Amino acid sequence: MLTYRGPFYIELISVFGNNVRNYTSTYGNANKKLFRIFIELSQNVSNYSEDFHLINNESRIGVGELNLVEFDSHFKFTTKNLVKKSDSKILTNRCDLINASSLMELRQLKREQRINSPGEKFGARIGLIQAVMLSQNKLEYQCEDVDDRFAYLSLTVKIDKN
Amino acid sequence: MENISIKSSPETPYFPEVNFDAGTGICEIAGESYMEETYKFYLPLTTWIKEYISNIKGRIELNIKLIYLNTSSTKCILDILETLKDYEDNGGKVNVIWFYDKEDPDMIDEVEDFEAESGIKIEMRELV
């Protein structure tokens, strides 16, 4: 349906997201969930990718990839971005924790993290939890080393059509 | 104290429409909220509410008509709700009303979480 590689500007994310929302408007369950997961994971790339553009020496726009594929019964949305190798274990452990948690446990985790997050430019840091709570499917992830400093993190969320 | 009025635009659908009225204490946030650097957008709104509480000390009615907000925006909305809860605990009159779409159970869960996290009562009204 959609593949993109480059900087994740908000203007672009918004246009892509709204096109996805319009295209899936007949899928009651998937429509709102897909749009919300699309925005959340895309903004993760924009905020946290280690490959980024600096605008006016201030705003940081992450570079990465996204891929949205439609199947008969579901959609699969994947984002990929560069991470520090030193962070990759923390991130995959976080994915494992999210995947091992029930919906109620995720809701509790989300509340705790939101209250305790530093806020401001760091945001709420609950995007992955939110994506799994919305989809009610496990996160699929892969982390492949690029060199001795960086790895490429791939995150996939499955969104059922009904 | 001046009002805040931010109009929505089809070119920037990630910014919500905002109307904060210092004369009536009625504050409204509507539309969608998923801009970059969320805290920069919400800081003047939180500051306005704190100034209203300090200077005018009147009743505040916060009407939220957001159909989508990203997780960064939820942190900023929670900060506003916590400020209002402090005001209420100190004798201020506060009403928070969240207008929701009955076909959107995820948003209803979100509002319940806001209520639990901030401790403030949120009245739910169906969007018509």
Image: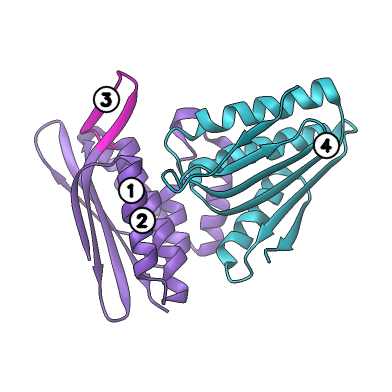
Chain colours: A purple, B cyan
- Mark 1 surroundings within 10 Å by alpha-carbon count, few (fewer than 14), some (14 through 19), many (20 or more): some
Marks 2 and 1 share the same chain: yes
Residue that appears at 72% across and 29% down: B49
The residue that mark 3 highlights is A54
Disc 2 marks which amino acid?
A: Gly
Q: Chain of mark 1?
A: A
Marks 3 and 4 share the same chain: no
Q: Secondary structure at mark 3?
A: strand
Residue A13 is labelled as: 1
Residue A17 is labelled as: 2
Disc 1 marks which amino acid?
A: Ile
Task: Check whether the beta carbons of the residues at disc 2 and disc 1 lie within 8 A of each other.
Answer: yes
Quadrant location of the N terminus of chain A in the rendered image? bottom left
Q: Secondary structure at mark 1?
A: helix
Vertically, is B93 above or below A75?
A: above
The quadrant where residue B111 appears: bottom right
